[in-house]
């Protein structure tokens, strides 16, 4: 029986179509190319090879490239004004508020980014907890320790938590622990995903 709702943030609490995360990806490319001293294509090819073993670009950089300037990375990748394309979503607010379950956020991003997005969406008061990368000791989803720590704080077993994320690798990571994960696949990008998959966040009511 579900007792808690755990949401990803980016492309989950707002539409992938607003382009916010696409801009984040562009800034990551620019940052990597400058830091690695190579062209963007070359830097991204290296990233693609390395990042498969990690949840985030940052973890790959720290583990394999001796990268240490975490705050500089966050400042560049998530600058002020990054949320300008977002608009408040009163319907989503009404939908989430109407669900009689406590709600939390688990993101592979930094807290400043989360706060900016939630202020912009006017959803800041909906969530009991925000678990960001610093809270997670800079380890991201789908690392099992991250999910276990979150479950520990929420005092719930994996099957009691409905976890909603737009990234298959993260949903699978939670499901492997016995969790109730759902893939939010707005653009029908992953028709072969073996687990539960929805196109619109409002469809989570099917699993409650
Ligand atoms: Mg996401």
Image (cartoon, helix red, strand yellow):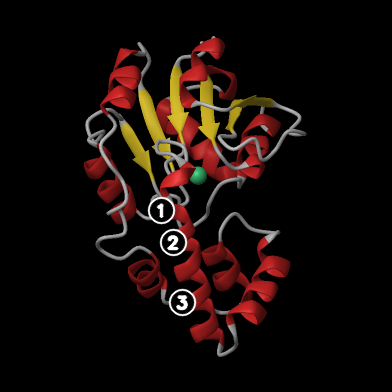
The quarter of the picture where the N terminus appears is top right
Q: Do the residues labelled 2 and 1 touch (CB within 8 Å)?
A: yes
Inter-mark Cα distance, 3 to 1: 26 Å
Q: Where does the image place residue 176, in percent across and percent down from the top left?
A: 70, 33
| Image disc number at residue 20 | 1
| Sequence-wise first label, 3 or 1 | 1
Q: Do the residues labelled 3 and 1 touch (CB within 8 Å)?
A: no
Give the image location of residue 35, x and y in percent: 50, 84
Decide if ligand 1 comes within 8 Å of the CB at mark 2: no
Q: Distance between the residues labelled 2 and 1?
A: 5 Å
Query: Of 120 and 139, which appears nearest the observer?
Result: 120
Q: Which of marks 3 and 2 is nearer the N terminus?
A: 2
- Residue shown at the point (26%, 50%) measured from the top left: 116
Structural crowding at the residue carrying mark 2, measured as other residues with C-alpha within 10 Å and reported as few (<14), some (14–19) or many (≥20): some
In the rendered image, which residue does mark 3 sit on? 68
* Residue beneath disc 2: 23
Give x and y (percent) for residue 177.
66, 31
> Label 1: how many residues lie within 10 Å, few (<14), some (14-19) or many (20+)?
some
Q: Residues within 10 Å of mark 3 (few under 14, many from 20)?
A: few
């Amino acid at each position: 029986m579900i007792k808690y709702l755990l949401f990803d943030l980016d492309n989950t609490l707002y539409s992938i179509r607003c382009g916010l995360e696409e801009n984040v990806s562009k800034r990551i490319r620019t940052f990597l190319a400058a830091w690695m001293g190579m062209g963007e294509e070359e830097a991204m090819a290296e990233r693609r090879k390395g990042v498969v073993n990690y949840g985030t670009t940052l973890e790959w950089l720290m583990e394999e490239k001796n990268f240490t300037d975490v705050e500089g990375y966050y400042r560049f990748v998530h600058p002020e004004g990054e949320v300008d394309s977002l608009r408040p979503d009163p319907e989503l607010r009404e939908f989430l508020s109407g669900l009689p379950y406590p709600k939390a956020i688990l993101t592979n991003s930094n807290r400043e980014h989360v706060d900016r997005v939630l202020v912009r969406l006017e959803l800041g008061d909906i969530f009991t907890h925000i678990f960001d990368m610093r809270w997670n000791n800079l380890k991201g989803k789908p690392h099992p320790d991250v999910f276990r720590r979150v479950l520990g704080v929420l005092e719930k077993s994996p099957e009691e938590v409905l976890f909603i994320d737009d990234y298959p690798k993260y949903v699978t990571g939670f499901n492997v622990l016995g969790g109730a994960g759902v893939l939010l696949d707005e653009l029908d990008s992953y028709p072969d995903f073996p687990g539960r998959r929805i196109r619109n966040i409002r469809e989570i009511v099917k699993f409650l």
